[in-house]
Amino acid sequence: MTTHTTLDRSAGIAVWRQIMETLKAEIVSGAFEKGSRLPPESELASRFGVNRHTVRRAIAALTAEGILRADQGRGTFVASAPLSYPIGPRTRFSEIVSGQNRAPDGRIIGSALEEADALLANQLSVPLGTMLIRVESLRVADGIPMIVATSWFVRERVPNFVADYADSGSITEALKRAGISDYSRKETRITAELVEARDAQQLGIALGQPVMVVESINLDGVGQPLQYTRGRVAADRMQLVVDGEV
């Protein structure tokens, strides 16, 4: 760790937020491991050349995100690093989360039947008006909401998907029950927007916060579009890593 970090006070970004992002980047990089204690506020204030109140605000923001935790009388500790989420041909939420020693979970928060409009028909390579299952889901790691997603499937291919996903908590398992043993990612598009009110409530973040929007198409084993998803990702809790082979 360096003994002094210079902040850009002309960048138009609040100083406390610059400190927060610096500490978060160090946690992600492994400079602070899970369970390790953060240096005292006085030491951090000296490092960044600010007062302790500014440091305290940065720490409070990281604590609210679940990255840090305060133990009374002992100090501030790293609770968890932002989830590193690889985007590649075999993107599986449960496997990615489990591989980082966290407990994955998924649950349906809404579902409906609807006819494919022009956009959905194009994404899923089906005729206009094809009956689809729309599923709203929440993906969680260690009890912390990560992704709110809207997915569309052709009803004829996965008629019991809603019940199977609700039972298993896994999209992969629900597809297996429909006879689809494997699938792969065709493409992923990543943009950003400000969170909408309903998503903010599900993710437990404040209105006005940014979310990453991840649109993806998955193919079955013979290359037929299987699933179109529009996911909204809590930007402060997840780091997307694009596979070099994509």
Image (cartoon, rainbow, N blue to C red):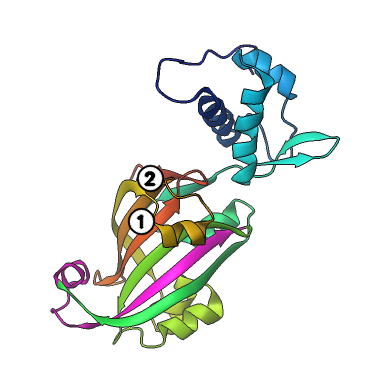
Residue at 31% of width from left, 59% of height from top?
216
Check the image and name the residue furthest to the right.
73
Count residues near mark 2 (Cα–Cα under 10 Å), then give few for <14, some for 14-19, many for 20+: few
Is residue 246 among the parts visible in the rendering? Answer: no
Residue 122 magenta-highlighted: yes
- Marking on residue 89: 1
Front residue of 49/90: it is 49
Instruction: Tell me the distance, in whole angstroms, between the alpha carbons under discs 2 and 1.
Output: 8 Å
225 sits left or right of 76 in the view: left
Q: Secondary structure at mark 1?
A: loop
The magenta-colored residue range is 118-141
User: Residue type at mark 2?
Assistant: Asp
Give x and y (percent) for residue 35: 74, 40
Q: Give yes or no for contact between labels 2 and 1 (Cβ–Cβ under 8 Å).
A: yes
**Which element is circle 2 on?**
loop
What residue is shown at x 31% (from left), y 71% (from top)?
221
Q: Nearer the viewer, residue 156 or 177?
A: 156
Please give the residue where the numbered disc 2 appears in the rendered image.
243
Please, is residue 172 above or below residue 244 in the view? Answer: below
> Looking at this view, is 51 or 90 the one in front?
51
- The picture places residue 226, in percent across and down from the top left corner, at 29, 72
- Does residue 129 lie above or below 144 as drawn? below
Would residue 241 be counted in the magenta stretch? no
- The answer to whether residue 119 is left or right of residue 140 is left
Residue drawn where x is 56% and y is 36% of the image: 28
The quadrant where residue 209 appears: top left
Residue at figure coordinates x 37%, y 48% from the top left = 194
Q: Position of residue 45 (x, y in %)?
A: 66, 18
Which three-letter amino acid code belongs to the residue tagged 1?
Pro
The answer to whether residue 224 is visible is yes
Q: Is residue 81 left or right of residue 137?
A: right
**Which badge, 2 or 1, comes first in the chain's sequence?**
1
